[in-house]
Amino acid sequence: MRRHIVGWCAILGLLSSFSAQEEPRSAIDFESAGHGWFVFPGFDGKVELTTNERDVKNGKQALQYTYVAMQGKLNGIIRLEPENWAQAFRFWVKTDRPALLAMLIQEESGERWQAPFWVNGNEWQQIALALSDFTLAEDVKPTNNKLDMDEAVGIGILDVSAIFFSAPEAAILFGSQTGTRVFWLDDFEFLSKAPPRVRDARALDDFQRGYLTWIATYGVTIRPEGGGMRVSYDQPFPGILGILKLLEKEALTNTKGLEVSLQVKTPTTLAVFVEEADGERWVATQSVGAETKPEPKTFLWSDFTITDDTKGKGDGKLNPPTVRMFSLVDWGVLTEERPPSNNWFIRSVRKVPNG
Ligand SMILES: [Ca+2]
Ligand SMILES: [Ca+2]
Ligand SMILES: [Ca+2]
């Protein structure tokens, strides 16, 4: 009998080592100095390990990156020789204020791939990124226009907020973003299996990823919730309360508008703004509120008018393929007809195709 048990244990042991081979996994827990992350060459700041309990997600230590944010400047950290079998990455991250971060993958060919994600600040958030979440950076020349993880020479995490948050005129939207900032990283994992992704060609976003690629304005909190996005604010003063998303080139080609499926607690007027590459901004509004479930609201390009402050900047036409930014703003608050306290649930933002 005992021999049988020993035999079984050996077989089980073999099986488990086989399955370990089939599904490799590698984790960096930042419990020791050899974690491999350092400040991006040419960028400033300091990488260290913190033991401050508040800033550690698991174990006794986490990575702490301290840097100075300035307009137009990138800050970030990098690690060389990533696991070339990785199909996904999962990690815990915390920032000292709301920020748009991005993970990037640098290929030997020169192609650089990036995946932005939003963090609310002052709380740990777990982010899981599949290779399919990455898009080619616009400033690199494609070689084969395909993400080849087996040719990756480095991975990085950047704070991209400063690129567009710290312009003097952006302070009105995002609060002051300049000055010393910190982000923390813990339990960084390379995964051999990608989290599932549903492909819906008509969706600009259907919130299936568990993290957000949107940006919230000052005073607004956004989080993934039940296959959608919760947008909430409760401010003492009116302001520009809303969310925005940067779009890839040509994202809105062959569309005649957008359909936003949402449920808004307190009735108000919602404005959709889009901004084109030529600098023109266009707006359309609709009444919303008190829906009992998310309802589709259609905004057709033919309903949009140019904003006064961008008149004369471009060609005077709304050309959907050139739209680079999409945003939703509580117009009722902006016109001071509604209180700056509300919450919305957005189920999806979908393209309305031509024809
Ligand atoms: Ca740790
Ligand atoms: Ca490639
Ligand atoms: Ca235009």
Image (cartoon, helix red, strand yellow):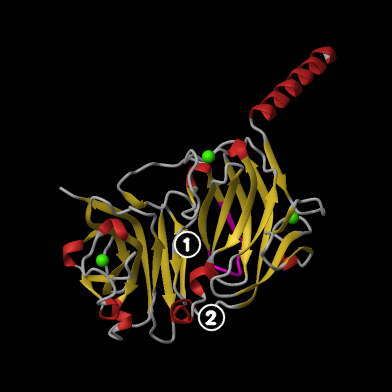
**In the image, is residue 322 part of the stretch drawn in magenta?**
no
Residue at the disc numbered 1: 223
Residue 259 visible, this angle: no
Vertical side of 79 occupied by 131: above or below: above
Closest to the camera, between mark 1 and mark 2, is 2
Amino acid on which disc 2 is placed: Ser
**Residue 108 location (% of width, % of height):** 61, 42
**In the image, is residue 123 part of the stretch drawn in magenta?**
yes
- Which mark is on residue 148? none
Asked if the beta carbon under badge 2 is closer than 8 A to the nearest atom of ligand 1, the reply is no
Marks 1/2: CA distance? Answer: 22 Å
The part of the chain drawn in magenta is 119-127
Quadrant where the image shows the N terminus: top right
**Residue 288 location (% of width, % of height):** 25, 69
**Residue 212 location (% of width, % of height):** 47, 58
Label 1 vs 2, first from the N-terminus: 2
Amino acid on which disc 1 is placed: Arg
Q: Nearer the viewer, residue 205 or 111?
A: 111
> Which residue occupies 70% across, 47% down?
80
Residue at the disc numbered 2: 176
> Which residue occupies 79% across, 19% down?
10
Report the side of 201 relative to 7 (left or right).
left
Report the side of 302 relative to 24 (left or right).
left
Instruction: Kindly indicate the quadrant of the structure image that contains residue 217.
Output: bottom left
Instruction: Kindly indicate the quadrant of the structure image that contains residue 248.
Output: bottom left
The crowding category of the residue bearing disc 2, from other C-alpha atoms within 10 Å (few below 14, some 14 to 19, many at least 20), is some
Vertical side of 71 occupied by 143: above or below: above
Ligand 1 in which quarter? bottom right
